[in-house]
Amino acid sequence: MNRDALVARIKLNLGFISGTAFDADIVTSLQQVQEELEREPELPWFLKKAFTGLVTVADTKTVAVPADFIRLFTSDQMFMRNSENEETPVLQDEEGFLRIRYPISEDTGTPKGFAIVNGQFRFYPTPDAVYTIQGTYFAKDAVLSSGATTNLWSTHLEEVLIGKAGFILASGKRDQIAMELFAGILGRGMQKLNEMNTADEAAGSKPVMGGED
């Protein structure tokens, strides 16, 4: 569903609002709601994204996180891949502990641990070469910037956008009937989100009875 369709649905549920007088307010609400959703503890599966082109610099401890970075998908292990295509796991930990375990006075080497501080990965020990960072993170979705645009939220969970943005607008109008309507839409959307995340987790797991063979 593109942005124009979302706006039309919200206007319909607000009581057949005609014209475009409220369109800008609806668009602003949709964009703000997306920002809020991407700060929630539970994020949808479709925001997961693999690191692409992210590399360390020799003798440099830090690497900036991607511009769309929200947080790591911790169920996927981060790896460092060297020029010979060999992979080494890297574990996230508290920076204070990493500083003690890998003091700056010691030699550089293949990173074994990392912390995230102020939008940067800080690797320990300091990388001694260029390593490609492998892993998965949750990424901010594209903003619904024009009427014809769609994004992952509007494609997979349009009910959440409509319900949450519409509830905010209905609250501003003190429209109790519309508030109840949008609350119902939001509830169905959140249930869909939970079901989709559960299905994604089940698809990525391997049921085992009695331990591995």
Image (tube, helix red, strand yellow):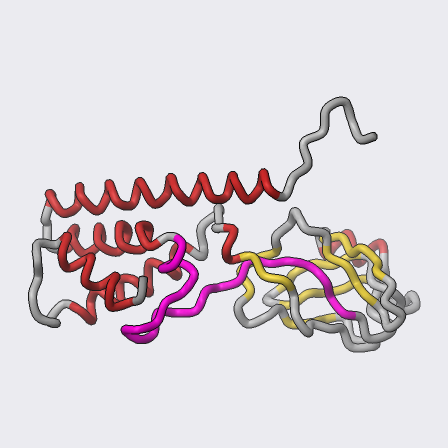
For image coordinates 24% across by 41% down, the residue present is 184
Residue at the spot 55% in from the left edge and 44% down from the top edge: 200
Assign the N terminus to one quadrant of the image. Answer: bottom left
Q: Residue furthest top?
A: 210
Horizontally, is 82 left or right of 203 in the view? Answer: right
Which one is nearer the viewer's eye here, 140 or 128?
140
Relative height, residue 85 to residue 112 (above, below): below
Examine the image and state in which quarter residue 144 appears.
bottom left
- From the viewer's perspective, tell me whether residue 195 is left or right of residue 172: right
| Residue found at x 18% / y 44% | 181
- In the image, 22: left or right of 27? left
Q: Position of residue 50 (x, y in %)?
A: 63, 62
Residues drawn in magenta: 132-156
Q: Using the image, determine if residue 39 lies above or below residue 106.
A: above
The answer to which quarter of the image holds residue 149 is bottom left
Does residue 134 appear to the left or right of 160 in the view shown?
right
Say whether residue 144 is magenta: yes
Residue at left offset 69%, top offset 72%: 54
In terms of depth relative to the viewer, which is nearer, 4 or 73? 4
Residue 76 coordinates in the image, percent (x, y): 68, 51
Q: Nearer the viewer, residue 169 or 150?
A: 150
Depicted 184 relative to depicted 126: above or below: above
* Quadrant housing residue 103: bottom right
> x, y (%) of residue 208?
72, 29
| The C terminus: image quadrant | top right
| Residue 75 is one of the magenta-drawn residues | no
The x and y percentages for residue 48 are: 56, 57
